[in-house]
Image (tube, helix red, strand yellow):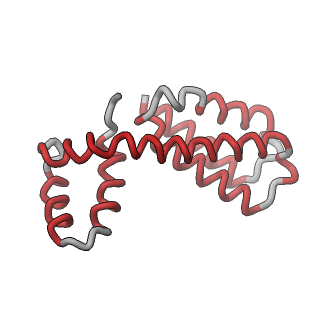
């Protein structure tokens, strides 16, 4: 499985900076300047499976929200739209790390735009288009 260093580095920074042991912060700061050091690569390899599980849970939530939204876009609540928009943003930034799992994601976004362009909230429409552009740039 390919490792997406740039995205996981951000996740690790958040994780390690919450560690109460000062050594964790020091070790991460040392590896941040040299992301290919053995310590950093070892950390990535140890946690890659747990991050994939977390990602798949978030992706499952996206799929559920997508199905709900596609069933009735006009009656979607503002909280539901914000949650859906946040999930689209998250998945689009991490999709290149899990290409097999997110192979349908760009097509989902295209389908949302093509079928519901007139009913989409402006911020949601902007997020969908921006996510498609981001995915295209990452290819």
Q: Is residue 118 left or right of residue 94?
A: right
Tell me where residue 137 sits by quadrant: top left
Q: Is residue 102 left or right of residue 21?
A: right
Quadrant the N terminus occupies: top left
Write the residue at 61% across / 42% down. 60
Residue 14 to residue 103: above or below: below
Which percent across, then down, holds residue 33? 15, 53
Which percent across, then down, holds residue 120? 77, 47
Residue 138 to residue 128: above or below: above
Count of marks placed on residues: 0
Residue 91 to residue 138: above or below: below
Write the residue at 27% across / 43% down. 46
Which percent across, then down, holds residue 3? 32, 35
Quadrant the C terminus occupies: top left
Write the residue at 73% across / 57% down. 80
| Residue situated in front as seen by the camera: 1 or 30 | 1
Which percent across, then down, holds residue 31? 15, 53
| Residue situated in front as seen by the camera: 138 or 39 | 39
Tell me where residue 48 sits by quadrant: top left
Residue 12 to residue 103: above or below: below
Write the residue at 63% across / 47% down. 61
| Residue situated in front as seen by the camera: 107 or 102 | 102
């Amino acid at each position: 499985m390919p490792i997406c260093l740039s995205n996981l580095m951000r996740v690790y920074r958040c994780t390690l900076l919450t560690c109460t042991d000062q050594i964790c912060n020091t070790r991460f700061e040392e590896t941040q300047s040299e992301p290919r050091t053995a310590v950093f690569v070892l950390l990535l390899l140890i946690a890659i499976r747990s991050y994939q599980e977390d990602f798949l849970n978030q992706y499952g939530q996206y799929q559920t929200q997508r199905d709900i939204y596609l069933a009735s876009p006009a009656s979607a609540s503002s909280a539901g739209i914000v949650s859906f928009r946040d999930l689209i943003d998250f998945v689009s930034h991490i999709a290149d790390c899990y290409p097999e799992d997110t192979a349908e994601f760009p097509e989902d976004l295209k389908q949302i735009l093509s079928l519901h362009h007139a009913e989409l909230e402006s911020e949601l429409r902007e997020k969908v288009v921006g996510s498609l552009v981001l995915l295209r740039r990452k290819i």
